[in-house]
Image (spheres, grey):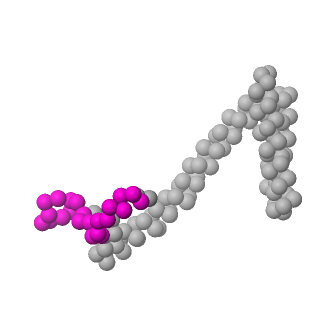
Amino acid sequence: MKKHTIVRIIIQSLVMILFGLFLILYLHHELFGSIIGGSGIIVLILGLFIPPAKKGLIRIQEKVIKWVGIILTWLLLVPFYFLCFIPGRIILLLSGKDPLNRKFPDTGKSCWSPYSGSFDSEQCKRQY
């Protein structure tokens, strides 16, 4: 096994174990801390002594992460969109407000917005 692979496995497992200890000792989350710390120990043992099993664990982990992402997208983001953005747009339409100024100008020859402030040469020096 290559040296950088061993170092990566040790660092990964140490971070998991230390984070698990942090969760247990400081935040008093025994269950999640034990799961993460135990996973760190399993990663260390599998990575150093049984590398093919670690590769299988990584494949399972990738599949779980993919499904968690899909579930979170459909359970959180889609309802949030339909519950927040669509009613907000309907309220703006009913109130006649156009905060982004998206309405097409009927009489104007240009779509440029007129500058309402006064021009000062000092503004050019302080752009941000």
Q: Left or right? Give the position of 92 relative to 40.
A: left
Residue 64, compared with residue 1, is above or below; it is below
The location of residue 102, given as percent across then percent down, is 28, 63
Taking the spot 31% from the left edge, 65% from the top edge, the residue there is 120
Quadrant of the image occupied by residue 48:
top right
Q: Left or right? Give the position of 89 relative to 72.
A: left
The location of residue 94, given as percent across then percent down, is 31, 76
Q: Quadrant of the C terminus?
A: bottom left
Tally of numbered discs: 0
Main SS, magenta residues: loop
Quadrant of the image occupied by residue 50:
top right
Taking the spot 23% from the left edge, 65% from the top edge, the residue there is 114
5 and 114: which one is in front? Answer: 114
Residue 86, compared with residue 54, is above or below; it is below
48 and 86: which one is in front? Answer: 48
The location of residue 11, given as percent across then percent down, is 79, 38
For the view shown, which residue lies furthest in the front direction?
122
Taking the spot 79% from the left edge, 24% from the top edge, the residue there is 3
For the view shown, which residue lies furthest in the top direction?
1
Q: Is residue 38 visible?
A: yes
Q: Tell me the magenta residue range.
A: 104-126
Asked whether 122 falls inside the magenta stretch, the response is yes
